[in-house]
Amino acid sequence: MDFLKSAVASAMAAKGPPFPYTFGDKVDLDPSIWTLYNGTRREDGSDCSIFSFDIAANRSSLPLARNALKKLRTLRHPGVIKVLDTVESDSYIYIATERLVPLRWHVKRKSLSPETAKWGLYSVARTIKFINDEASSVHGSLKVASVYTTESGEWKLGGFEVLSNVKDDEAVIYTYGSLVPDSGRYTPPELAKSGWDAIKRSPHAAVDAWDFAALIFEVFNGNFASDQAGQTKNIPPSFHSTYKRLTNANPKARLTVAHFLEQGRRHGSFFDTPLIKLTDGVENLGVTTEEERDAFLDDLEQLTDDFPEDFFKMKVLPELLKSVEFGGGGPKAFGLVIKISTKLSNEDFDAKVLPVVLRLFGNPDRAIRVCLLDNLPHMIDRLSQKVVNDKIWPQIVSGFTDIAPVVREQTLKSVLVIITKLSDRTINGELLKYLAKTANDEQPGIRTNTTICLGKIAKHLGTGSRAKVLTAAFGRSLRDPFVHARNAALMALSVTSEYFTDEDCACRLIPVISPLLIDKEKPIRDQALKTMDVYMQKIRKAAAGMPDSALPADGAGAGAVARMGAPQPEASGGAGWAGWAISSFTNKLSAAAGEITASGSAAGTETVPPKRPATATPTTTSTSSASALHRQAVKSPPPSAPLTRNPSSAGAGSGFGAGGETFFPEDDADEDADAWGDMGDMDDGDDDGTAAANDDNPFAEKSTPPKKKTVESKPFDDGSEPDFAGWLAQQAEKKKAGGIGAGGKALPKGLAKSGSGAGAAASTVKKTATPAVKKTPIVAKKKVIDTGVKDDGGDGDDGWGGW
């Protein structure tokens, strides 16, 4: 069948001038002299319709076809069918128009809503008024078969076979009016009685008024017969009184279409509808004043969904886009663009809306940017990942650093919308850097929203850096003075607990949550309790699955556990606890006799010889014996780990080795340092040392290397043995200066040694004191508990001396 149609079209085209259109399917029509086809334009493939008239088959109707061709070429009005091209030969007449659908199709399917029907009748009435008044003509064949709808849903008037100017005495309507197919049903009573010449004796607009009443009846009922004129079945009540005046039997008393239109446009009348206002306003949107444009957009926002979608897509949407981009329509117009575009296909959206959206993201107007970000949720599903990453994201990022807080906040909120379209590299790189800035924003609301945003996008972060980023970011928010920021951090920690390891929960998160248990604000305390319960349950579950001990089951280690595993029941108080700690060591004193040897020393390590004095002379240096012995008892490594000298800790002033050397198991040294470094993420800034910022964590607090504190030397009595060697060294210095004791008094008799002068005193001290004794009083350094990264230069305590 398609082949036959193509062959016929080719044969028809061969008989006359070239016709640059291709014939498609035939469209069913009411009785007519024309055959309607769907067609396409060969040049660009656009859709069109083609009216075809075969001269040989309908030679008697040729004057009607030629009259219609002439009037369509010369009559220009928005309500008239738009003609693209025409061709006339000895055998046929072709008229190519915009793509059309007969109104009869919609009437048969009853697909016209009351509002759409009013809008269409209003458009036809305006066209008839133009023909009657401005063109001084009579249509003469107004009916449903003469009306078509376009792709935009607009009603267009055709059927110009007998359209005539009343000033022309030889007009076609007088001679051929009765030859129009099915004209008998629509002929006014005066013409049916006296013939078409009666038009000259009556107002020329009376014929079209009668036919317009028939059109109203057909639109709401489907069919019309001459005896149904004036009936109001299914016609809206607002039409009744005016509609009946159109069907007056006296043509001179009959209401014209122009008067019908005027009465319908009055305030509150049947043509005073939002859709009709829209069609009138959209055509002049580009030339209206700002007040008129705002009023039009307000009316447009109130429209419901039962209006013709095609009209919004084909007519309203392009005008709104032009208004947004060039006409100052602003955010309100763009909001309407998004509302209409939700009903577009993906192809139409990409072709009509997306190019404008991409240009608007580059617009420096902050109001437009905020409007774009507000409406981003309605567009994101239509945007491909490539478009978001390559074209939209580079424009969005400028909003993170904008001077207007509202732009920064809306940009931050948009992250939740576009996160699924961003690449992993963008999320874990550029995005986190910008979120680190908004986490320190001067606006507390933006800081709070940053915490909320991180909690919601946690599942999209890289598994390698997620825990570090969240720990640092939430830890900072927990210390925020803004109450809602702290609350947001607690809630975010509650919902992201699955992303933290058991060690993170116990060592990093619970310590920073616990201060909020006594926060000054009750909502924070309540939320802190809930969050703490989440992490405690996770830790309990992890601890239940752990072994009872990680120490080997045989050897000296097992004996140590048996002796030191738990305090005895009678040692329940504070004194009992201290006594247990010391007695644990003294019970092992006999086993600790002899030299400390490093079994299986690794290459490159130095075995430390014993330097304990053979006598009980109280000549120890630095820390007290109880303190040192306690550290040895508690931190004694398992037998399997060789003890070596840690060169970096030499001179630290703590530990077991002579000269301040500290011993650690080789395998654990680096792990300890790393652990302290990680704790720096949660540094609250109160101490003198802060954690070094990690390059892969933009939320880590940056700081300069800590300066060493100068601790004032004060005597410190830790309850250990007296330091006689230090005291003798001090007295020797004073004696050398003049033999005067403390307080300016001479030394008591008996304390002075044989010999005289400074040399004798010096020699006496040299013989008595050990080489480790210095000439200044030995004092304990003030203990500073620091959770940051410790400077391993060797002057810090190992944390156990305070015991």
Image: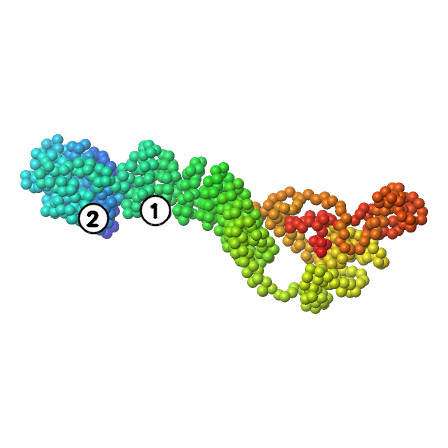
For the residue pair 567 and 331, the one nearer the viewer reads as: 567
Q: Which residue is mark 2?
A: 107
Three-letter amino acid code at disc 1?
A: Leu
Residue at the image position 83 percent from the left and 57 percent from the top: 613
138 relative to 29, above or below: above
Q: Residues within 10 Å of mark 2 (few under 14, many from 20)?
A: some
Q: Residues within 10 Å of mark 1 (few under 14, many from 20)?
A: some
Residue at the image position 13 percent from the left and 44 percent from the top: 230
Q: Which residue is mark 1?
A: 344
467 relative to 395, above or below: below
Q: Secondary structure at mark 1?
A: loop
The image shows residue 799 at horizontal and vertical percentages of: 70, 53
Please say whether residue 17 is visible from this viewpoint.
no
Three-letter amino acid code at disc 2?
A: Val
Label 1 and label 2: CA atoms lie apart by 25 Å
For the residue pair 3 and 680, the one nearer the viewer reads as: 680
> N-terminal of the two: label 1 or label 2?
2
For the residue pair 527 and 110, the one nearer the viewer reads as: 527
Please say whether residue 706 is visible from this viewpoint.
yes
| Direction from residue 139 to residue 748 in the image, left or right | right
Contact between marks 1 and 2 (CB within 8 A): the answer is no
The image shows residue 495 at horizontal and vertical percentages of: 50, 55
Q: Secondary structure at mark 2?
A: helix
| Direction from residue 135 to residue 99 in the image, left or right | right
| Direction from residue 137 to residue 584 in the image, left or right | right
The image shows residue 412 at horizontal and vertical percentages of: 48, 44
Residue farthest along the right direction in this orientation: 755
451 relative to 614, above or below: above
Q: Which mark is residue 583?
A: none
Instruction: Write down the quadrant of residue 356 in the picture.
Output: top left
